[in-house]
Amino acid sequence: MKKSINNALSEEEQEQVLQGLLSRKIWRFYELLAKWAPIPLMLGHWYGVWDYGRYPRPTVLNTADNGNCIIWIYFLAYVYMPICMIPVSFFFRYCWIFRIPFFYFFGINAIRLYYQHWLITPEQLEMHHVFIIFTLILYAYGFIKIAITRSKCRIPDVSEWRMRFFGRRRKNGTEKPSVLDGKKTSL
């Protein structure tokens, strides 16, 4: 029986089936990475801010020697990742809760630009704490809203948006049938 099933597809068709399975696995991995990768980076930044606030000390990095490496790491973490991940979040139709880390990274960049220093300084510490508390409030609001409404965290599809904008159709028959309703109308 196995021979007849295996021989039902040509080698080219079997390769196409395997390619389809492989591409679905790649897309699934990419989706999971886009959804969950920013969270450990954000938590790591929170730990760094907490550690720096608990034991204030001057920055020990010699930026003359390794400044390019530090700039590259900051560019990858705080510029490249949010810019490339936000379109992915729209492509996979993530709800706003999964976009909170992106807003967090943009806020951290705004703090760094305002204080004109790309390493954390004692002057920035209070703003970082305020921004972390704001981020936690956003998460709490989102999870409480999901728990109260008992809905899934997703972006509504086009038909749901259309219903929100244009309202529901009346059921009492006072409305004229439309071609879009799928009903045949006679002239």
Image: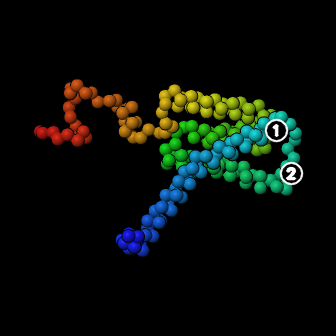
Query: 167 or 150, which lies in front?
Result: 150
Disc 1/disc 2 C-alpha distance (Å): 17 Å
Q: Residue at x 50, y 47 (%)?
A: 92
Q: Residues within 10 Å of mark 1 (few under 14, many from 20)?
A: some
Quarter of the image that includes the C terminus? top left
Q: Position of residue 122 (x, y in %)?
A: 82, 35
Q: Residue at x 39, y 40 (%)?
A: 158
Horizontal side of residue 38 vs 63, given as left or right = left
Q: Position of residue 107 (x, y in %)?
A: 66, 38
Q: Earlier in the sequence, mark 1 or mark 2?
A: 1
Instruction: Name the residue tied to disc 1.
Output: 52
Instruction: Name the residue tied to disc 2.
Output: 62
Q: Residue at x 61, y 33 (%)?
A: 139
Q: Position of residue 135 (x, y in %)?
A: 65, 33
Q: Position of residue 14 (x, y in %)?
A: 43, 69
Q: How many marks?
A: 2
Q: Residue flagged by tag 2: what amino acid is it?
A: Asn
Say if residue 44 shows up in the picture: yes
Q: For marks 1 and 2, give the one nearer the viewer.
A: 1
Say if residue 106 shows up in the picture: no
The relative height of residue 112 versus residue 29 in the rendered view (above or below) is above
